[in-house]
């Protein structure tokens, strides 16, 4: 059974990687392997049907919480975008110098990710870049750097990445020591790729233009055209209200989570409802042809549903591998054959670029006890860093990467050829700085 599950997962993974050469949307193979893995597990797993059903529903509860969070965050960002709210940010970025712009975007993403989380930050920053950067090739490099910066920024904050949150809630790390140990390594993990990407960006013939100078030349959908037409009808005051309420809706997610200890999707659904209510009040006196493109009902139709379904399929497949014990066996094998916690953490980080980092971290938490490795020990700091940043080595290795892939249609092999090695060097650089300092 284990062999069949691994073969199905690898074949599906290859089909996803070859999405563009095969001309098959990545959501299709993702959903197939998600269902096929569970079917194989149910038929040959040797467990009672109700046990497998319980495992599936338990995992699906976690997956659904991620999907609802993703859809809600994307809706909020699209609502801000429809009101031209991101102009509040883009109008304040006056520089047209490529190097300066790279550093501004990278550092803004890095620190914003620590306050929000890497997924939400990637969605926000990608939306801003779509308004600022005209040339598509240049924008892909910027967006790729946003993914690296978001993952690096999420690693040193207890609310910046789901894996650091797991370790924080589980009692393996504390906020103060996490920041002390991982802030500099995470910053190195970002700075190194910026230094590599800067000369590459400068060689792009068409260069970069800010959105204030010229709008993107890419074709937009009919819905987007209507929305952009309506943007000129939105008063500056309403534009700012939507921007402020939207950012507040995202920022208060970790605050509400910390206070209530409820999953983040509860907070963002509630905040979306509040923003929805405010938006209805803002446009209630306007004519239908003006307000319709700006309502949440119409904005939801612009969400990239195939990317959400792709995410669901991948997570279902990985959850099956976890339920079958394959990921746990892999983690134990590494522990027994390698032994060195630095090397084990390094490999776990690279594996997180292929499979979800959540079950890998969960396996590590189950393998090592707090009696052997107490709170804030080097092991837990290494796991937090490696699991948080290793996913940047592949575009589908993190939630931030998947979101960027869906929004900007980044090809798997484009990222693997041009960005993966840069992200890897940054990953190794951050780990090396951790070992030197601590």
Image (spheres, rainbow, N blue to C red):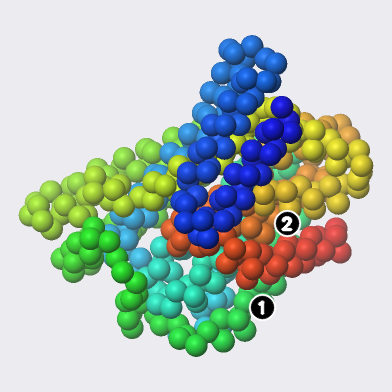
The answer to whether residue 225 is seen in the rendering is yes
Disc 2 target residue: 182
Please tell me which residue lies in front, 256 or 436.
436
Please tell me which residue lies in front, 147 or 241.
147
Q: Quadrant of the C terminus?
A: bottom right
What label sits on residue 195 in the rendered view?
1
- Find residue 322 and report its horizontal and vertical position in percent: 68, 32
Disc 2 versus disc 1: distance between alpha carbons?
Answer: 20 Å
Looking at the image, which residue is at 57% across and 50% down? 15
- Find residue 168 and report its horizontal and vertical position in percent: 67, 40
In the shown orientation, is residue 80 left or right of residue 168? left
- Find residue 379 and report its horizontal and vertical position in percent: 82, 45
The answer to whether residue 278 is seen in the rendering is no
Mark 2 lies on a secondary structure that is helix
Looking at the image, which residue is at 45% across and 45% down? 308
Using the image, determine if residue 345 lies above or below residue 332. Answer: below
Please tell me which residue lies in front, 166 or 64.
64
- Of circles 2 and 1, the one toward us is 1
In the shown orientation, is residue 259 left or right of residue 319? left
In the shown orientation, is residue 124 left or right of residue 238? right
What label sits on residue 135 in the rendered view?
none
């Amino acid at each position: 059974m284990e062999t069949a599950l691994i073969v199905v997962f690898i074949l599906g993974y290859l089909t996803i990687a070859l999405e563009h050469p095969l001309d098959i949307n990545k959501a299709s193979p993702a959903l197939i392997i998600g269902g096929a893995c569970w079917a194989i597990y149910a038929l040959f797993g040797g467990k009672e049907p109700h046990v497998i059903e319980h495992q599936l529903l338990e995992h699906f509860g976690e997956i659904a919480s991620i999907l609802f969070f993703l859809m809600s965050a994307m809706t909020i960002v699209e609502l801000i975008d429809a009101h031209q709210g991101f102009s509040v940010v883009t109008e304040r970025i006056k520089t047209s110098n490529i190097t300066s712009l790279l550093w501004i975007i990278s550092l803004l993403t890095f620190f914003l990710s620590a306050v929000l989380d890497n997924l939400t930050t990637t969605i926000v920053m990608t939306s801003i870049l779509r308004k600022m950067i005209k040339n598509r090739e240049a924008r892909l490099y910027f967006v790729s750097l946003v993914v690296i910066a978001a993952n690096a920024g999420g690693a040193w904050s207890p609310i910046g990445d789901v894996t650091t949150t797991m370790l924080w809630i589980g009692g393996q790390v504390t906020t103060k020591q996490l920041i002390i140990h991982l802030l500099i390594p995470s910053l190195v993990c970002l700075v190194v790729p910026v230094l590599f990407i800067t000369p590459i960006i400068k060689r792009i013939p068409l260069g970069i233009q800010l959105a204030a100078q010229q709008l993107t030349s890419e074709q937009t959908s009919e819905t987007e055209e209507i929305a952009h037409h309506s943007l000129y009808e939105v008063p500056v005051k309403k534009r700012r209200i939507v921007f402020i309420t939207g950012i507040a809706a995202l920022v208060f997610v970790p605050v509400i989570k910390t206070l209530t200890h409820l999953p983040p999707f509860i907070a963002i659904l509630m905040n979306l409802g509040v923003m929805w209510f405010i938006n209805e009040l803002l446009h209630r006196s306007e004519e239908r042809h003006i307000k319709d493109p700006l309502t949440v009902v119409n904005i939801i139709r612009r969400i990239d549903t195939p990317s959400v379904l792709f995410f669901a399929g991948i997570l279902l497949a990985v959850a099956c591998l976890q339920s079958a014990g394959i990921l746990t066996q892999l983690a134990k094998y590494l522990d027994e054959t390698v032994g060195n916690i630095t090397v084990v953490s390094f490999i776990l980080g690279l594996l997180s670029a292929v499979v979800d980092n959540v079950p890998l971290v969960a396996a590590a938490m189950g393998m090592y006890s707090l009696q052997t490795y107490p709170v804030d020990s080097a092991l837990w700091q290494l796991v937090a860093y490696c699991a948080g940043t290793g996913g940047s080595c592949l575009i589908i290795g993190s939630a931030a990467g998947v979101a960027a892939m869906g929004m900007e249609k980044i090809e798997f092999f484009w990222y693997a050829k041009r960005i993966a090695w840069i992200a890897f060097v940054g990953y190794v650089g951050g780990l090396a700085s951790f070992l030197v300092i601590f």
